[in-house]
Image (cartoon, helix red, strand yellow):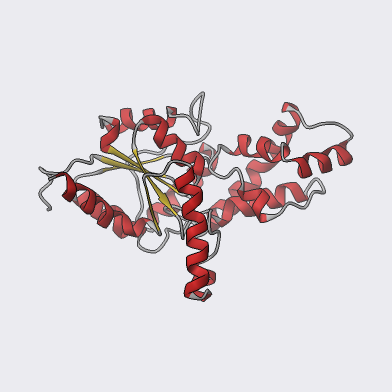
Amino acid sequence: MTNTSNRFYKAAVFDWAGTIIDYGSLAPTAVFTRLFETIGIDVTDAEARGPMGLPKRNHIAAMLEMPRIRDAYIRITGHEPGDDDVSTLYAAFLPLNLEVATDYANPIPGAVEAVAALRQRGLKIGSTTGYGRQVMEAVIPIAARHGYSPDNVVCGDDLAESRPGPVMMYRCFADLAVYPPEAVIKVDDTPPGIAEGKAAGCLTVGISVTGNGVGLTEDEWHALSPADQQQHRQAAEKILLDAGADHVIDSVADLPDLIDRLESLMN
């Protein structure tokens, strides 16, 4: 067991899709695309990914506020989208999300090993997600069978307020009994998830290559030329840095090395 006496960081709190599971954050994109197809609106991947990281009901509301989608919704329904419309779409979203999310619950390569390395260093492992509790009850056991079981899971519909505010992180602090906030690392692939960590006072680490900002499968990523990979990487990094990320790495697999470097600078 690694000596943890000189370790500063006490916990890492991870997002799920695009960060720990679901390389490319494909499941949410597929569900939002399919959802809007059911009411006759074709949405692009960019439109579906734009609000990614928000709780899913809020994500639907954000998409309905996009001018093109809003105009299409008015043409189809004859009225502007309101809260009842969001509720109706969210009710249709839940079974679709449950069906799709479980197909994308496998851990990203290197994630399980990285988490094990952090546990060896004495860190507790927390998690927050924009997914609702109903979906996570199906996803959690699949991830566990593949070796990933965090110490807690806080879902987008568990509390009165969710991302981009700090409340879900506060629940993690309490569940894990970790403090001060600056000794906790929030790891996420989306701006709302980074904002969540910043609002709570944590160190924030963005995930570029495996996450929503690149949005490619592992095979699609490796099929790119090095120049194209760098272009995609830099675009995703900019999004995360603009959101306030303190550091950006390609994958969770790179996190143990980053933590070692940061802690070495403190000694």
Q: Tell me which residue sits at (23%, 49%) in the image.
A: 262
107 or 218: nearer the viewer: 218
Give residue 241's position: percent from left, percent from top: 45, 47
Does residue 88 appear left or right of residue 94 in this picture?
A: right
Report if residue 154 is visible in the image.
no
Give residue 182's position: percent from left, percent from top: 28, 34
Q: Eyeballing the image, is 64 above or below 18?
A: above
Does residue 57 appear left or right of residue 247 in this picture?
A: right
74 or 155: nearer the viewer: 74
Examine the image and state in which quarter residue 67 appears. top right
Give residue 186's position: percent from left, percent from top: 37, 41
Q: Quadrant of the C terminus?
A: top left
Q: Eyeballing the image, is 160 above or below 36?
A: above
Of all residues shown, which one is farthest toward the top?
160
Q: Eyeballing the image, is 173 above or below 102?
A: above
Q: Tell me which residue sits at (60%, 53%) in the image.
A: 100
Give residue 167's position: percent from left, percent from top: 43, 27
Does residue 136 appear left or right of residue 267 in this picture?
A: right
Report if residue 47 is visible in the image.
yes
Q: Tell me which residue sits at (34%, 45%) in the image.
A: 150
Examine the image and state in which quarter residue 64 appears. top right
Q: How many tags in the picture?
A: 0
190 or 106: nearer the viewer: 190
Does residue 214 appear left or right of residue 173 in this picture?
A: right
Q: Eyeballing the image, is 4 above or below 213?
A: above
